[in-house]
Amino acid sequence: MYPNMYHPSSIDETPDLKGDAKHYTRTARPTKYYIIDFGLSRKYNPSDAPFLEEIIFGGDRTVPEFQDFDGACDPFPTDVYYIGSAIRAQILE
């Protein structure tokens, strides 16, 4: 991984070809992964707990909160379930 980039024709040299390109291994500087939101987030006031929102059905129909649909549920356990399900499907299997 090159913090200051390298020359396209020679990855061992700096972009201006004046020296060796500084680099790190992936174990020395591990990649950071961020979980991103696609516009469905909401801001909550902590004093307004419990938080209930209408269910937004996604592709995963195995969410326990969705099995007994009553119109609203706490979105936080659902998000944790979605993240765990995605990790299980993409990384572990």
Image: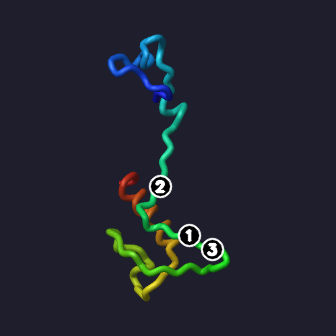
Q: Contact, CB < 8 Å: mark 3 with mark 2?
A: no
Residue positioned 36% across, 58% down in the render: 89
Q: Does label 2 or label 1 sit earlier along the sequence? A: 2
Distance between mark 1 and mark 3 Cα atoms:
7 Å
Image quarter of residue 15? top left
Where in the figure is residue 70, as x and y percent of width and height? 43, 88
Where in the figure is residue 41, as x and y percent of width and height? 48, 67
Q: Contact, CB < 8 Å: mark 2 with mark 1?
A: no
Query: What residue is pinned by disc 2?
Result: 35
Residue positioned 48% across, 12% down in the render: 19
Foreground disc of the pair 3, 2: 3
Choose between 23 and 16: the one closer to the eye: 16
Q: Residues within 10 Å of mark 1 (few under 14, many from 20)?
A: few
Name which residue type carries label 3: Asn
Q: How crowded is mark 3: few (under 14 residues within 10 Å), some or many (20 or more)?
A: few
Res 45 label: 3
Q: Does residue 51 appear to the left or right of 37 in the view shown?
A: right
Name which residue type carries label 2: Ile
- Judged from the image, the secondary structure of the residue bearing numbered disc 3 is loop
Residue positioned 51% across, 70% down in the render: 42
Name which residue type carries label 1: Lys
Identify whether 61 is placed above or below 2.
below
Identify whether 82 is placed above or below 90.
below
Dividing the image into 4 quarters, which one contains the C terminus?
bottom left
Res 76 label: none
- Judged from the image, the secondary structure of the residue bearing numbered disc 1 is loop
- Judged from the image, the secondary structure of the residue bearing numbered disc 2 is loop
Q: Does label 3 or label 2 sit earlier along the sequence? A: 2
Res 43 label: 1
Residue sitting at the far front: 16
